[in-house]
Amino acid sequence: MTECECLGELAAQCIFRTFLTVIVVIIDKQIVQRRDVVIRRGRQLQNLLRLPEWMRVFSETDPGMLDKDIRTSAECLAASSLSAGLGVTAALAKGTLWDFWALSLGVAIPVCINIVVWLMLIHSKRRQSRAQPLLIGNGYRSKEQGGRHYDHSAGDLGVDESIRAVWFCV
């Protein structure tokens, strides 16, 4: 490789990773930090669609969904949308939807990502419901009664870990 090619590849990598970092920060500021609205709307949508209990990803008890699950699902949805956009671009460039790259990037990859995320969220909800303390009235048992408060950010490594993953794992 020549020096110009190496410099171009370095610039492309920096631009791509910076773009992904901006997406991670936007997800943290606009989605994760508004978790109450996300959970309320998610519960409303589940009830509107009349999903059976085993397909629901938002539990009816607090915290509804953990921060790490909201962050992971939003990041995967962004990746799915990026792939779908590339698929549409490939379809427009080739002039047909029946192109291999258009179908792969625009349909197959986003569908697979969304199915895996949905299954992960269902599994997380089941794991969370097994670990919740007993409820008294509308709140959790007090510490004097042997209960504990449920931390919705438990296990969440935060935006720093997501940015680190973008820069070192991609």
Image (cartoon, rainbow, N blue to C red):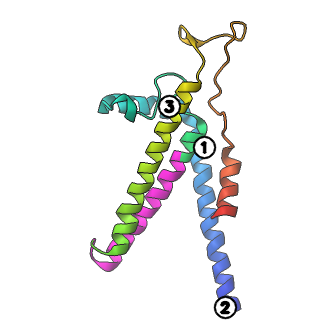
Query: Main SS type for the magenta part?
Result: helix
Q: Amino acid at mark 2?
A: Met
Q: Is residue 1 above or below residue 126?
A: below
Report how far apart the C-alphas of labels 1 and 2 lie in the structure. Answer: 40 Å
Label 2: state its secondary structure: loop
Residue in view at x 62 percent, y 50 percent: 25
**Which span is picked out in magenta?**
73-97
Q: Please say whether residue 31 is visible from this viewpoint.
A: no
Q: Quadrant of residue 54?
A: top left
Residue in the picture at 27% in, 73% down: 98
**Label of residue 71 in the image:** none
The residue indicated by pointer 3 is 126
Give the residue displayed 35% in from the left and 71% down from the top.
102
Mark 1 or 2, nearer chain start = 2
Q: Residues within 10 Å of mark 1 (few under 14, many from 20)?
A: few
Indicate yes or no whether the magenta region holds residue 92.
yes
Nearer-N-terminus badge (3/1): 1
Q: Residues within 10 Å of mark 3 (few under 14, many from 20)?
A: some
Disc on the earlier residue, 3 or 2 = 2
Tell me where residue 132 sits by quadrant: top right
Q: Residues within 10 Å of mark 2 (few under 14, many from 20)?
A: few
Mark number for residue 29? 1
Q: Amino acid at mark 3?
A: Arg
Name the mark nearer the viewer: 3 or 1: 3
Give me the disc on residue 1: 2
- What distance separates the C-alpha of mark 3 from that of mark 1? 27 Å
Which quadrant of the figure contains the N terminus? bottom right
